[in-house]
């Protein structure tokens, strides 16, 4: 059976009931792949950057389990941007690119396929006062994928376009913008335009599926039978 191994941050990780309704893309991505023949191992961890993920040895369990024909999906960027945190910060066209190359090489050493994924947009990505912007880190992923001839899914671009295209209230519902008194884990409610609701995780996971379909070949072959007819219709 083919396995998709996922390395990433809190936008990808699998959540427990303790943080419900927060949902990572890797947690729901099985909705988009073949039920028989493809499995997912989600190794993404909250708060990690490429630097901290590697420094903590979190790639090693993936490396030990990967076999020929598997896939390694790599989606970081949110925490690599945090210049005031030396344990996580990775300069976009320096250490960040070098770290991405380490993931690519790890996959290729095991005969697996690396897929580099640009970071998911924050909902308020157009806010000129936003403390973090993905521009440089997303571009670094694109350039690293081109240099290494690795598969690229430009989730940053696609998610920015989606957030721009839908009504504001709908885009709010894709993220952890929660009312008071509804969810036990967040009794005071929450205003969070980074982490995802189940609806958002499914929508943005659907964009990754579209990216895989566009890549064709072994990447498109991961998707569920009938994807060609569905093609994301009704995803929202």
Image: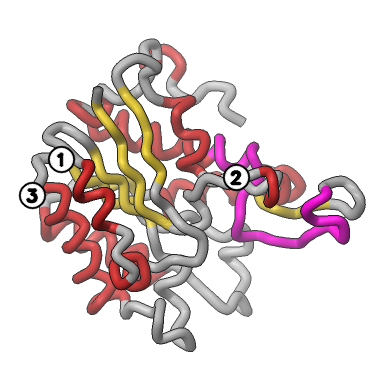
- Report how far apart the C-alphas of labels 2 and 1 lie in the structure: 27 Å
Q: Check residue 194 for magenta coloring.
A: yes
Numbered disc total: 3
Instruction: Tell me if residue 230 comes above or below residue 44 in the rendering.
Output: above
Q: Check residue 78 for magenta coloring.
A: no
Q: Nearer the viewer, residue 86 or 132?
A: 86
Image position, residue 153 (x, y; %)? 32, 45
Instruction: Tell me if residue 219 comes above or below residue 177 in the rendering.
Output: above
Residue 123's tag is: none
Residue at 87%, 46% (x, y): give it. 182
* Left or right side of 63 for 10: right
Residue at 8%, 49% (x, y): give it. 109
Image position, residue 222 (x, y; %)? 29, 25
Image position, residue 52 (x, y; %)? 37, 71
* Left or right side of 164 for 136: left
- Report how far apart the C-alphas of labels 2 and 3 lie in the structure: 31 Å
Q: Nearer the viewer, residue 145 or 60?
A: 60
Check disc 2 and report the residue beneath it.
23
* Left or right side of 146 for 186: right
Image position, residue 73 (x, y; %)? 31, 46
Check disc 3 and report the residue beneath it.
109
Mark earlier in primary sequence (2, 1) = 2
Q: Which residues are magenta?
A: 184-203
Secondary structure under the numbered disc 3 in the rendered image? helix
Residue 112's tag is: 1
Mark earlier in primary sequence (2, 3) = 2
Secondary structure under the numbered disc 2 in the rendered image? loop
Question: Dot 3: few (<14), some (14–19), or many (≥20) neighbours within 10 Å?
Answer: some
Image quadrant assignment for residue 100: bottom left
């Amino acid at each position: 059976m083919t396995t998709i191994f996922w390395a990433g941050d809190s936008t990808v990780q699998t959540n427990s009931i303790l943080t419900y309704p927060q949902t990572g893309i890797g947690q729901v991505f099985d909705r988009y792949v073949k039920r028989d023949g493809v499995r997912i191992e989600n190794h993404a961890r909250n708060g990690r950057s490429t630097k901290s993920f590697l420094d903590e040895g979190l790639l090693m369990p993936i490396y030990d389990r990967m076999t020929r024909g598997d896939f390694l999906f790599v989606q970081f960027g949110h925490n690599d941007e945090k210049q005031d945190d030396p344990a996580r910060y990775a300069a976009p066209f320096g250490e960040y690119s070098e770290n991405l190359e380490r993931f690519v090489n790890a996959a290729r050493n095991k005969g697996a396929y690396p897929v580099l994924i640009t970071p998911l947009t924050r909902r308020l990505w157009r806010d000129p006062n936003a403390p973090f912007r993905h521009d440089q880190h997303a571009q670094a992923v694109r350039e690293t994928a081109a240099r290494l001839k690795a598969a690229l899914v430009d989730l940053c671009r696609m998610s920015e376009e989606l957030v721009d295209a839908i009504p504001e209230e709908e885009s709010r519902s894709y993220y952890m913008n929660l009312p008071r008194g509804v969810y036990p884990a967040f009794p005071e409610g929450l205003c969070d335009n980074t982490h995802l609701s189940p609806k958002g995780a499914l929508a943005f996971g659907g964009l990754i599926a579209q990216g895989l379909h566009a890549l064709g070949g072994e990447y498109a072959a991961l998707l569920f039978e009938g994807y060609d007819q569905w093609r994301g219709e009704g995803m929202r």
